[in-house]
Image (spheres, rainbow, N blue to C red):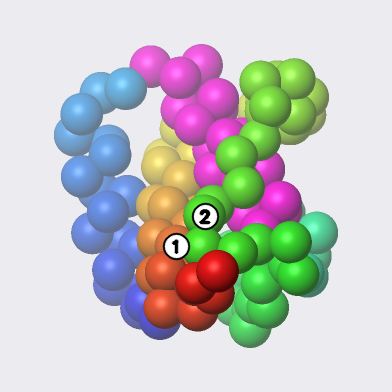
Amino acid sequence: MFTKEDVEILAYQRYITGEDYDKSVWYLAELVVKILKNAQNGYDIKPLETDNLVLLLNDNVNGDLLEPTEDEVKELAKVIYYEHPEKSKLHFFIAEKQLLLEYIKRVIKENKINP
């Protein structure tokens, strides 16, 4: 899957971009909601916690990532914003979720059922 070092490298790359806090919160929310929609046990994934989970795809995932609605992302973004994590931690959580979502995308692609 990915290592802690992979997460740290990506988090640092995000840090040096200087992305604004609100955009980072929104991006984290978007990543987490995508994971939640596509993994059976995705609801075990918390936006402000590190994860080490084995994921199973939802039955309704067939070759394409299920995308969240803007309202779903907005709802979670409000929760994250209310928790107000440090920006450095926000970068770390985003990097982790980004790598996790990339892994999910690879699994979806590998397991695509052709009609």
Q: Where does label 2 land, which residue? A: 64
Q: Which region of the structure is painted magenta?
A: 20-38
Q: CA distance from mark 1 to mark 2?
A: 8 Å
For label 2, the SS is loop
Mark 2 burial class by Cα count in 10 Å: few <14, some 14-19, many 20+: few
For this rendering, which residue is in front, 112 or 70?
112
The residue under label 2 is which amino acid type?
Answer: Asp
Left or right of 67 on screen, residue 27: left
- Taking the magenta stretch, the answer to whether it contains residue 26 is yes
Say which residue appears at 23% left-offset and 59% top-offset.
Answer: 9
Image location (x, y in percent) of residue 106: 40, 70
- In terms of secondary structure, where does tag 1 sit? helix
- Quadrant containing the N terminus is bottom left
- Residue 62, given in percent of the width and then of the height, sits at 60, 64
84 vs 51: above or below: above
Residue to which mark 1 is pinned? 105
Q: Callout 1: 10 Å neighbours few (<14), some, many (20+)?
A: some
Q: Is residue 50 visible?
A: yes
Up-down relation of residue 51 to residue 24 (above or below): below
Residue at point 49% right, 31% down? 27
Q: Position of residue 87 (x, y in %)?
A: 46, 32
